[in-house]
Image: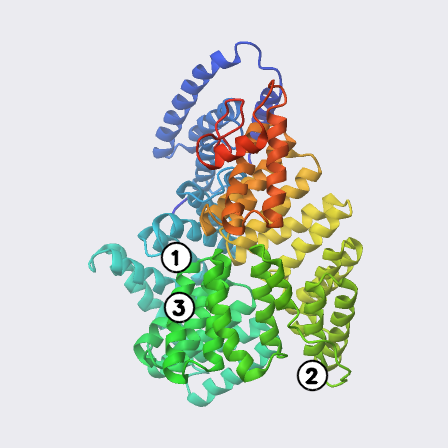
């Protein structure tokens, strides 16, 4: 892997620079900026020369001078400031001063994520070098987190099949291969992925291809040397039984261990590309999904899909299952287009084998609907939900939980698009409570809760959920995932009701069991950290709220990546809490991060992106930057108006925000243009911005 706590001296210099920035610069400060910029360029040039000569102490001295001057005239988050921190980190790595390298690279990583969003090639280099520093400090798990962040960025910038992505795959494989982990199986998987990319991108005789091919051969031998106790078919079956048992008990680490042994035994007995190896890879992928580790799940499921296409064929039900699981993983990772592709391949197989009226086909239709809903393509989502519903109603009846779940999704879409009448009609399809003490009453109570919640009758909804919970705890146990989910539903209802103290209590009950069953690094646990934070902020405990949001963000970024809607939602919550604390600089930074993610994931015309524009506008309002607020609210209103219509409550609320911002922006103008006239002209393209002459683009 390539080289990628400041000293007491550098800390003192940084403190001096900060004092200079915060102090009075004097009337000649701007005139001096050009001189300082020349000094920065000179220091950087000298530093590079010394670094190339391996004269690291001199290089470090000049890079630190360049850094301090950059902070002075550009600020902490400027790209040059970040770059100098990266270069200093690389010098420390070359000097084998790993704690210092870690500290300054962590500062660089924090700056790019607060500023540009951390989604460019420079950010990937910082993450990669920070990963190396942590690995050298004996922290392989933390190192892997940063390498995976670097990989996600490079995949986005260069493509998932690019040589740049392959380089990070090799880094990750090297850590798994190291004596610290000695996980040869995972190392083989990552080396194999890198080899596939390089073989497709480069000539077969290229040194980086032949060298990696040799590495894969060595890894395969190391793996096979560890198979003495699992090579026989009987022992493979035993490993599989143990793995299933542990997975059912939510003991995921043990389940993974036994599934991997079964897979390795299958490879040893029948070779890499055999039917059973595809199935075992699928099972490993499912365990990683349960653990919330979607990047790892994607690797194994992608391998399973490739083998299934060759060995199982395109008309095999196991292939359909593998394709569906891969689609779900990609959906969780925010890659909606690829998810749709795999879901549709799964659907085609099921239709061919089982017919168009089977429940399995209805399930696949529901998967596709969920992706379209996530993209904001509500007409397509409704079409696919209705297709799934027709089959499920016919086969299962209107009271079945899977049918009621579709009623709820269709109602939610109608509510989003402003059709309150249809939304209410669909919610009323939920069945009422019946006096039946059997286990079947669980679904009856849950369906009733959905109906009452849709009607805004929170007291009866809570009563129904608590009745369902009592039955679930009695029949399944208090720590069963179904019971945990119901506690979370109860907390959510208290939040809707405005009883934030009870919401906090129930979310914490949910969290306690989630941490025991799923672990602290699970996707669902992260969602609860975020929900607790919102309740705490509502109750005035902003400090605790920030702590829980940081936990949520760390887990989301690790499990689904930075470019995911749920990660963006956590960024938005962070901005909201900072706004409540009147720390508008931080609020704007987090709101911008959320906006950039939503633009990337959904595009600039999606309601989620529109909401981000509105959130950015709110931060501008708080800072008195009313023209920028007008631009942001106008863009949000235009999106809502297009998607939902002018009678939708969200559209009307955004219009009210826009009008308030417009009036503030034009407060000092005599006889400003009436708001309705200005708005009509702005929407028709004749005018943008307020009447103060400011540009109308968001953030302008």
* Cβ atoms under marks 1 and 2 closer than 8 Å: no
Front position among marks 3 and 1: 3
Is residue 153 in view? Answer: yes
Residue assigned mark 1: 169
Q: Is residue 143 above or below residue 429?
A: above
Q: Residue at x 64, y 72 (%)?
A: 429
Q: Position of residue 309 (x, y in %)?
A: 32, 75
Residue of label 2: 440
- Give the Cα distance between marks 1 and 2: 49 Å
Mark 1, Cα crowd under 10 Å, few <14 / some 14-19 / many 20+, is many
Q: Secondary structure at mark 1?
A: helix
At which x and y percent is residue 543?
Answer: 73, 44
Q: Tell which of 286 and 617 is nearer to you.
A: 617
- Check if mark 3's residue and mark 1's residue have beta carbons within 8 Å: no
Q: Residues within 10 Å of mark 2 (few under 14, many from 20)?
A: few
Nearest to N terminus: mark 1 or mark 2: 1
User: Which of labels 1 and 2 is toward the front?
Assistant: 2
Mark 3 lies on residue: 342
How far from the left and from the top, in percent, is residue 251?
Answer: 60, 74
Q: Nearer the viewer, residue 362 or 158?
A: 362
For label 2, the SS is loop
Q: Which mark is residue 385?
A: none
């Amino acid at each position: 892997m390539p080289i990628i706590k400041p000293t007491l001296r550098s800390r003192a210099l940084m403190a001096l620079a900060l004092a200079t920035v915060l102090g009075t610069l004097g009337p000649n400060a701007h005139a001096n900026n050009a001189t300082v910029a020349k000094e920065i360029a000179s220091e950087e040039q000298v530093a590079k020369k010394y670094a190339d000569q391996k004269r690291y102490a001199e290089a470090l001295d000049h890079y630190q001078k360049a850094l301090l001057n950059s902070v002075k005239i550009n600020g902490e988050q400027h790209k040059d400031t970040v770059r100098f921190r990266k270069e200093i980190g690389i010098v420390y790595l070359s000097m084998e001063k790993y704690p210092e390298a870690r500290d300054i690279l962590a500062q660089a990583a924090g700056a790019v994520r607060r500023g540009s969003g951390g989604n460019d090639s420079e950010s990937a280099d910082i993450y990669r070098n920070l990963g190396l520093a942590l690995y050298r400090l004996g922290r392989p798990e933390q190192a892997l987190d940063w390498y995976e962040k670097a990989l996600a960025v490079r995949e986005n910038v260069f493509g998932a099949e690019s040589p740049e992505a392959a380089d990070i795959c090799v880094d990750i494989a090297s850590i798994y291969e190291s004596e610290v982990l000695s996980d040869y199986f995972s190392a083989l998987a990552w080396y194999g992925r890198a080899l596939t990319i390089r073989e497709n991108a480069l000539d077969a005789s290229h040194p980086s291809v032949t060298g990696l091919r040799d590495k894969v051969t060595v890894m395969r031998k190391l793996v096979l040397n560890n198979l003495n106790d699992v090579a026989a078919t009987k022992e493979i079956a035993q490993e599989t039984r143990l793995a299933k048992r542990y997975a059912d008990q939510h003991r995921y680490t043990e389940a993974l261990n036994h599934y991997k042994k079964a897979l390795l035994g299958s490879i040893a007995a029948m070779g890499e590309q055999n039917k059973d190896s595809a199935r075992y890879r699928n099972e490993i992928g499912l365990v990683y999904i349960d653990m919330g580790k979607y990047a790892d799940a994607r690797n194994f499921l992608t391998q399973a899909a490739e083998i299934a296409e060759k060995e199982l064929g395109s008309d095999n039900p196991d292939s359909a299952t593998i394709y569906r699981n891969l689609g779900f993983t990609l959906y969780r990772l925010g890659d909606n287009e690829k998810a749709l592709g795999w879901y549709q391949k799964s659907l085609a197989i099921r239709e061919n084998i089982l017919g168009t009226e089977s429940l399995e086909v209805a399930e696949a239709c529901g998967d596709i609907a969920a992706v379209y809903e996530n993209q904001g393509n509500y007409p397509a989502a409704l079409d696919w939900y209705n297709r799934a519903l027709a089959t499920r109603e016919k086969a299962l009846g209107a009271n079945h939980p899977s049918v009621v779940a579709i009623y709820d999704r269709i109602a939610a879409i109608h509510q989003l698009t402003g059709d309150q009448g249809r939304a209410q009609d669909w919610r009323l399809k939920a069945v009422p409570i019946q006096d039946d003490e059997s286990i079947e009453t669980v679904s009856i109570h849950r369906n009733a809760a959905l109906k009452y919640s849709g009607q805004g009758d929170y007291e009866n909804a809570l009563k129904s959920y608590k009745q369902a919970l009592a039955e679930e705890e009695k029949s399944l146990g208090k720590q069963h995932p179904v019971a945990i989910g119901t506690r979370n539903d109860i907390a959510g209802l208290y939040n809707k009701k405005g009883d934030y103290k009870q919401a906090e209590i129930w979310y914490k009950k949910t969290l306690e069991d989630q941490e025991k069953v799923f672990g602290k690094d699970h996707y669902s646990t992260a969602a609860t950290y975020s929900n607790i934070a919102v309740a705490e902020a509502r109750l005035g405990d902003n400090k605790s709220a920030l702590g829980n949001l940081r936990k949520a963000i760390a887990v989301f970024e690790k499990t689904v990546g930075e470019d995911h809607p749920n990660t963006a939602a956590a960024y938005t919550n962070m901005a909201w809490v900072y706004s409540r604390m009147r720390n508008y600089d931080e609020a704007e930074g987090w709101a911008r991060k959320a906006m950039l993610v939503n633009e990337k994931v959904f595009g600039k015309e999606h309601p989620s992106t529109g909401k981000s524009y509105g959130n950015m506008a709110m931060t501008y309002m708080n800072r008195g930057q009313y023209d920028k607020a007008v631009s942001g609210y106008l863009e949000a209103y235009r999106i809502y108006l297009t998607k939902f219509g002018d009678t939708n409550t969200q559209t009307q609320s955004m219009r009210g925000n826009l009008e308030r911002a417009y009036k503030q922006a034009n407060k000092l103008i005599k006889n400003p243009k009436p708001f309705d006239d200005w708005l009509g002209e702005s929407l028709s393209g004749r005018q943008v911005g307020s009447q103060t002459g400011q540009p109308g683009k968001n953030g302008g």
